[in-house]
């Protein structure tokens, strides 16, 4: 261990989930006596705060209300709210005059970065965690975890931090369909903007771009490429007949309420699966109706004008990708009803194929062996987001993400980020009180 400090909690990753938790810790400590404060440290492998930077399209808006920010549902009086950020930036009245609940995504990223800067003393950037090891006390109890990360200041060296609790929020990783590999001309949409900017700056001609996927990110990618490369044909490939509208109706949105997590958590497994199936249209492979209508109108205008740059290859699947001329790719697309295949010579293929939760067991290493699993080999997680462990383990492992099987659709979403932070913070405090 590199110091004598024992942290109450060490967070692995510093996206919105741990940003919200760090603020909860900071606000609690500001009103606590010195001996009652929580000692928290968050480790982030990136050199600075960043949240989906590759998809910060200039006109893309949030799909959740600004009131579901980092703090408001936990404490509406917090000065870490989005409204306080707007006031400090001098844009509060301007924003209100828009009469919208949904800010620009780029502006919400600016809000996150503003909040992250205020709690920067709790974060160590350029700190990639490489191991989490259980530590036993004199009685044989696993009372701590040693969290080891790379030391950015000393190449090849590591730093170890000891913690009574570890919270894991590694975020999601881009999903690349089997048989496909990323390259200079095959991208995941998570890198859309920097990749497109480099391609445009290179001066290379872009005659055709192909986008695979049917969700919000896919539709945004199609729209962005169509505007960015005005001479290119943009082909959208998906297995559906058309984009499915997102269900953001008031009753359906109640699946994202904090109370809905309680209902889901206590429900039998069959009911849990039914709820996921019923409400997938609120979050997965769906598109905002406004964007659907905009893309359709663009395609129709082009048909009227006799120059169709926007093409929708529906009821179709990608069946092959091979290197093409001039550094591009040859994409084979099958029309599913007939089995007919066509080859498209493309300058770029963008995979808007979603994300997958990162496996926490790969990071936890030996500590993962202490985590109990259910009959389906899923981690057993308590309502407070703490992984269940044997009685001889007093140190805590908390998960933010990878808990859809226990906590439902909101396990990684912004909708309950403030409430999740409160629940974990309260659990850590309760655990410390119990030990004392």
Image (cartoon, rainbow, N blue to C red):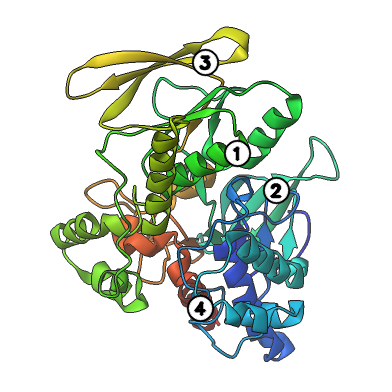
Q: Earlier in the sequence, mark 4 or mark 1?
A: 4
* Distance Cα–Cα, label 1 vs label 2: 15 Å
Number of labels in the image equals 4
Q: Dot 4 corresponds to which residue?
A: 67
Tell me: residue 10, above or below residue 173.
below
Q: Earlier in the sequence, mark 1 or mark 2?
A: 2
Q: Dot 3 corresponds to which residue?
A: 329
* Distance Cα–Cα, label 2 vs label 3: 31 Å
The reply to whether residue 358 is in sight is no
Label 2 CA crowd tier, 10 Å (few <14, some 14–19, many 20+)? some
Quarter of the image for the C terminus: give it.
bottom right
* Distance Cα–Cα, label 3 vs label 4: 44 Å
Which is more foreground, mark 1 or mark 2? 1
Q: Dot 1 corresponds to which residue?
A: 191
Q: Residue at x 57, y 76 (%)?
A: 98
Nearer to the camera, 212 or 417: 212
* Distance Cα–Cα, label 4 vs label 2: 27 Å
């Amino acid at each position: 261990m590199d110091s004598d400090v024992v942290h109450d909690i060490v967070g692995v990753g510093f996206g919105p989930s741990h940003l919200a938790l760090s603020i909860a810790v900071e606000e609690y400590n500001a009103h606590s006596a010195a001996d009652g404060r929580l000692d928290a440290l968050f480790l982030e492998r990136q050199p600075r705060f960043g949240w989906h930077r590759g998809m910060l399209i200039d006109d893309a808006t949030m799909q959740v209300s600004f009131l579901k920010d980092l703090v408001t549902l936990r404490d509406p009086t917090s000065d870490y709210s989005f409204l306080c950020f707007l006031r400090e930036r001098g844009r509060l009245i301007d924003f209100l005059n828009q009469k919208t609940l949904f800010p620009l995504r780029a502006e919400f990223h600016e809000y996150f970065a503003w909040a992250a800067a205020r709690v920067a003393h709790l974060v160590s950037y350029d700190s990639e965690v490489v191991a989490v090891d259980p530590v036993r006390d004199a009685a044989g109890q696993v009372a701590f975890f040693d969290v080891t990360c790379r030391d950015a200041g000393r190449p090849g060296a590591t730093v170890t931090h000891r913690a009574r609790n570890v919270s894991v929020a590694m975020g999601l990783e881009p999903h690349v369909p089997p048989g496909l590999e990323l390259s200079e001309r095959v991208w995941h949409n998570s890198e859309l903007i920097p990749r497109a900017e480099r391609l445009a700056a290179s001066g290379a001609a872009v005659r055709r771009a192909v986008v695979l996927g049917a969700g919000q990110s896919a539709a945004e990618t199609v729209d962005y490429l169509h505007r960015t490369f005005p001479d290119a044909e943009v082909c959208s490939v998906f297995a559906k007949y058309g984009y499915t509208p997102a269900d953001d109706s008031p009753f359906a949105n109640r699946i994202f309420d904090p109370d809905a997590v309680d209902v889901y958590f206590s429900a039998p497994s069959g009911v849990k699966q039914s709820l996921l199936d019923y409400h997938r249209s609120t979050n997965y492979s769906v598109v905002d109706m406004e964007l659907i209508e905009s893309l359709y109108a663009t395609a129709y205008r082009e048909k009227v004008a006799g120059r169709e740059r926007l093409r929708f290859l529906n009821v179709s699947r990608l069946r092959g990708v091979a290197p093409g001329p001039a550094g591009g790719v040859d994409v084979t697309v099958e029309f599913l009803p007939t089995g007919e295949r066509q080859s498209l010579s493309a300058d770029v293929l963008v995979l808007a194929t979603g994300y997958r939760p990162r496996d926490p067991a790969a990071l936890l290493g030996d500590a993962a062996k202490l985590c109990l699993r259910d009959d389906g080999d899923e981690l057993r997680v308590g309502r407070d987001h703490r992984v269940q462990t044997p009685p001889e383990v007093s140190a805590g492992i908390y998960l933010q993400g990878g808990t859809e099987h226990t906590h439902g659709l909101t396990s990684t979403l912004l909708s309950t980020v403030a409430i999740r932070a409160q629940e974990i913070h309260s659990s850590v405090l309760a655990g410390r009180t119990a030990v004392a």
